Amino acid sequence: MPMPLTRRSFAAAFGAATGAALLDSRPARAAMLAAVHRGAPDDAIVLSYNENPYGPSAGALEAARRAANIGNRYPDAADDEIRAVIAKHHAVAPDRVTLGCGSSEILQMADTAFTGKGKKAVAAEPTFEAVLDFARVLSTEPVKVPLTADFRHDLTKMAAACDSATGLVYVCNPNNPTGTVMTGDEVASFAANVPPSVTILVDEAYHHFVEDPRYRTACELIDQHPNVVVARTFSKIYGMAGLRLGYAVGSKERIAAMAKYATFSNANAVVLAAARASLEDTNLVPRMRKTMNDTRRWLVAEMAKQGRRTIPSETNFVMIDVGGDVTPVIAGFRQKNILVGRKFPSLSNWLRITIGKPEEVQAFAAALKEIAPVKAA
């Protein structure tokens, strides 16, 4: 199983590539891949971590190059500037935004601010594990609520699980690993049924891929429900998973409570410049959404042709039923230099596949026929 990209492994990889990855050269990218995904061949197809295979936009790369020239300076002024840009993007005041080293730090900040010994944290099962993992470190009691039969959050049961001891309830929308969404009306009803003392953390890491017209960002709920906090990231559609920048939008009080636990200078000059350029490129999100969602649609259609089930996804990944335990399937793909998602114990027959470039997804589909042939009915 490939090692996850940690801050330390990214720093080592960045140093090993001597910054050349920003020049978009093939050898530099191969060196970076080998360093980050330890033990993986340089030519491996990486469909394992829900990364954007196209990387940062040209404008973001150019902004990053320029910002590297002031890499000897702390990025405090740039930090304030990007918070103001993000605040304007969401039509809120800058003191309602806080930054994180990726949205992972945002989730950790929320746990630290709102949970702790004697508290509970409620989340779906399965979902992105970071919130409950961080909560355990804080001696918080994790409460897992199984998904519904159609692989969506059971918001009714999650609201019922929130009591006076609950500090945080986590909703990943769209959900990782299933790719499913909760509608705007469903989340609004949920917010109305959760006690105001409980912080509702809505993780919208995959927000930009959604096409379902019933979906709405939970940012719309914050004024009416100030216990709602929304987490976003530049890792996914903006293609900056290795540069690390996330943020939270919420009420002034909730954001202030979280910001106390942020690491000093938790964003760097390069990613701040790249993020600003990305937000200013109004064509980036629709262009990238169409590119990757079209590839996802091709993959889903191909899986149907092969006789396989998929979970309807509104993200840059798809869950595929491989007809049995995914463990040997994952190993089979690695032998073919294709890295795929990990096993989720509660969905042991389902394999999560990141949407790569068309040729990468086509190679995956062809290999799947050999590794896990569909059994005759």
Image (spheres, grey):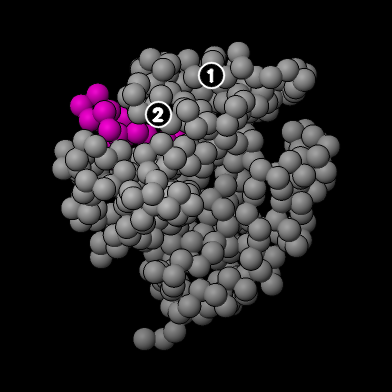
Task: State which quadrant residue 113 falls in.
Answer: top left
The x and y percentages for residue 312 are: 35, 57
Q: Position of residue 298 (x, y in %)?
A: 47, 55
Q: Is residue 207 visible?
A: no
How much space separates mark 2 and mark 1, taking CA atoms?
A: 20 Å
Residue type of the residue flagged with mark 1: Ile
Please report contact status of discs 2 and 1: CB closer than 8 Å, yes or no.
Answer: no
Residue under the point 52% across and 31% down: 262
Which residue position holds label 1?
A: 82
In the image, 272: left or right of 216?
A: right
Closer to the camera in the image, 231 or 32: 231
**In the picture, which quadrant includes the N terminus?**
bottom right
| Number of other residues with Cα within 10 Å of mark 1, as a class: few under 14, some 14 to 19, many 20 or more | some
Classify residue 355 as left or right of residue 265. left
Q: At 48% from the left edge and 15% from the top edge, which residue is drawn?
A: 84
Name the side, left or right, on which 202 lies relative to 128. left
Q: What residue is shown at x 45% (from left), y 49% (from top)?
A: 138
Question: Where is mark 2, residue-wise?
Answer: 257
Residues in magenta, as a range: 214-233
Indicate the secondary structure of the residue bearing disc 2.
Answer: helix
Label number found at residue 293: none
Place residue 161 in its image quadrant.
Answer: bottom left
Picture coordinates of residue 271 (x, y %)? Answer: 63, 28
Residue 225 shown in magenta: yes
